[in-house]
Image (cartoon, rainbow, N blue to C red):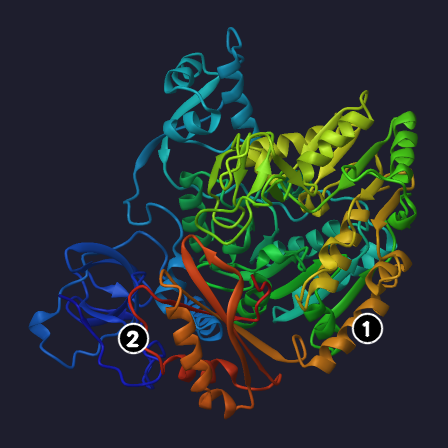
Amino acid sequence: MALPHRNHSRNPFHGADVPDPQFFDHGDLVGVLTAQPLDRILDYKAPEGGCHLGAFVEVPLGPRKVLGVVWGAGKGDYDRAKIRSVIRVLDAAPMRDEMKQFLTRAAEYTLTPMSAMLRLATRAPGLGDPPSMKKVFRLGQVAPDRMTPARARVIETLNDYGGLAFTLKELAETADVSTSVIKGLAAQRAVLEEDRPRDLPFPHLDPDHSGKTLTGDQQAGAEALRAGVRTGQYGTTLLRGVTGSGKTEVYLEAVAECLSQGRQALVLLPEIALTAEFLTRVEARFGARPAEWHSGVTMTERRRIWKMVGQGGAQLVVGARSALFLPFQNLGLIVVDEEHDTSYKQEDGVLYNARDMTVLRASICGARVVLASATPSLESWANAEAGKYDKLTLTDRFGVAVMPVMKCIDMRNESLPSDRWISPSLQRAVTARLEKGEQSLLFINRRGYAPITLCRACGHQIGCDHCDARMVEHRFLKRLVCHQCGESKPMPEKCPSCEAEGRLAPVGPGVERLTEEAVALFPDARVVTLSSDMYGSARALKAEIEAIAAGAADIIIGTQLVAKGHNFPQLTLVGVIDADLGLQGSDLRAAERTFQLMRQVAGRAGRAERQGEALLQSYQPEHPVIRAILAGDEDGFWRAEAGERRHAGVPPYGRMAGIILSSTDPQEPFDVGTELARRDGPLRQIGAKVFGPAPAPIARIRGRHRVRLLVTADKGAPLQAALSRWVAQVRLSPQMRLAVDIDPQSFY
């Protein structure tokens, strides 16, 4: 069996004082880090033919064969005869030293085991498969002799994916057809069946391909970003620009400069639904489509991207947050679009913020970072104000478009039945838009039909069987759904508590209920609902968004999905149903998130030649956040918010960590939490404070009882080292889990 290093240093993953050799001959001892849940590096013998430092290898671990990386020289301070050999070296570019540094430092910052970090960096299927010829299918140039619905789905799928190749199984599953349909199209050459290597380089992107003509404001910003890329050194720029100001065109010029330098670029997007329009813009700028990395991409394509990124066969990757862990060969630029978006924080597994990890990775490999947003996070705003980041600001919308007029509807003055949420004032505004042939958007940040289902006989609220959360009615699906664990069940006919029939009633509005109301108020209008859980695939959602942009709807009912970068040229009115919704609770970022979301949603209006209007329904029009939104005084809002955070000593002017304890036993997390709170010596040594333990706001998820502690410290305090010493004092049972969340974004 493989034996662990006997390494008594604090971090067994740091290199030794003597540099490791770059190549290990057959039989040399190598230390291999695996993606298995082990907290140590294992010794193996180098295989026949030897292996490079950083090589991806397959090694025996007990009875299994597992993936690993040659991390350095082996220790070999025990019986060499018991050490097993590396099985084989995989056909992949070795992990570069800068990637090893990135994973190590990210692990230290987030207090994550290195095995989990390696799993993030190897999330592609079939990495151990040898190179081979494979049957793949792509779009042909010949029309089939007759078109059936199934054949149309195949053609549409191949078109949607921009000519990418599929295996037979992947194409059949994606298009929802049988394999015989595809083979029939192949027989007619409407679909081409080819033998080709599994992994081919991506089409060349031409940085000199014609781009859009930029305004003076945009040109100045683009040249500043280009100049930063030309230095070949690390630096971060906060690119602020009002919605519709052309931030994308500006940072694509930085991408062009990066490609001209022969380096690779990465653009991170917060939402899969944004990629379709964005990829079209990239193709128009560079003459070819880039690599696309997110959960909607086929397994074949994910493997190809991972390999090609490591070999330099992909110049530009557009992807979700996990694309940050791809094995770039020569990364020169990372763009984080909508950098304020909360989806950049991963809330399960490895708890990391992709925006912060972007800055870390770029600083290691000498790349530039562009953080783009109309409403930046307070952390980025503060870094720019302090001079840590460069600042670029675009103040005008592109072309003839101007910013929307912002107004508040004081709901205290509106006459509205208890089961209605669209005020008479908003109804009149929508009617006026309908008469002009313009689009309106009604926004509410709640999925489903109603957040609570209440029994009017006994007062029971239907909750999840596995979580301490209320189940949300999804009337379109005729089911109740838990938004914590995903559990769903049919809508009951009678109360599960008192069994009274016909007494269950929805309480509060969701996006589906708002749709129902809009259809009743505007019977002649084409009403479309945009919510992520209402579409079976990312492709269907993209198609709906494209149809809306082309004018296929009069009224759009949407959740926060619609706030993220979409361009609807005919949309001139945005109505926010409950502008007060995000202001409740104790979340320290509640004001910031409400301000960002309202400004982003309002920015969907009037992006073409007609000026837009944004109406915010509020019962608290005098609230400082609502007043700041209406005034458009963004810097004033940030200064006031920064002052409050600085006074409280919380991020970005202090340090914070959340400790989440969970177990199937309801008492165990409290006992462990109490012991941690009592043994807080390591934290007191750095001046940190512990709050809790206390039940988490949602105290049970997926059958696990949850308790939280909160640790705060001064900005410069060495928090991670103290946390490591602190949590090491307690021994956890097999059913107990402890997670440390550095810089928590949510507190559920």
| Vertical arrangement, residue 675 with respect to residue 738, above or below | below
Name which residue lies at 28% across and 67% down: 38
Q: Residues within 10 Å of mark 2 (few under 14, many from 20)?
A: few
The one of 259 and 130 positioned closer to us in this rendering: 130
Q: On the picture, is 102 further left or further right than 584?
A: left
- Confirm whether residue 398 shows in the render: no
For the residue marked with disc 1, what is the amino acid?
A: Ala
Residue 741: percent from left, percent from top: 50, 69
The one of 219 and 584 positioned closer to us in this rendering: 584
Name which residue lies at 20% across and 54% down: 65
For the residue marked with disc 2, what is the amino acid?
A: Pro
Name which residue lies at 61% across and 68% down: 232
Quarter occupied by the N terminus: bottom left
* Badge 2 vs badge 1, beta-carbon distance below 8 Å: no
Quarter occupied by the C terminus: bottom right
| Vertical arrangement, residue 290 with respect to residue 2, above or below | above
- Mark 1 — residue? 640
| Distance of label 2 from label 1 (alpha carbons) | 54 Å
Residue 624: percent from left, percent from top: 85, 65
The one of 614 and 479 positioned closer to us in this rendering: 479
The one of 34 and 585 positioned closer to us in this rendering: 585
Q: At numbered mark 2, what does the secondary structure look like: helix, strand or loop?
A: loop
Q: Residue furthest bottom?
A: 685
Residue 35: quadrant of the picture: bottom left
| Vertical arrangement, residue 156 with respect to residue 250, above or below | above
Can you tell which of label 2 and label 1 is closer to the viewer?
A: 1
- Mark 2 — residue? 21
Mark earlier in primary sequence (2, 1): 2
- Confirm whether residue 252 shows in the render: yes
Q: At numbered mark 1, what does the secondary structure look like: helix, strand or loop?
A: helix
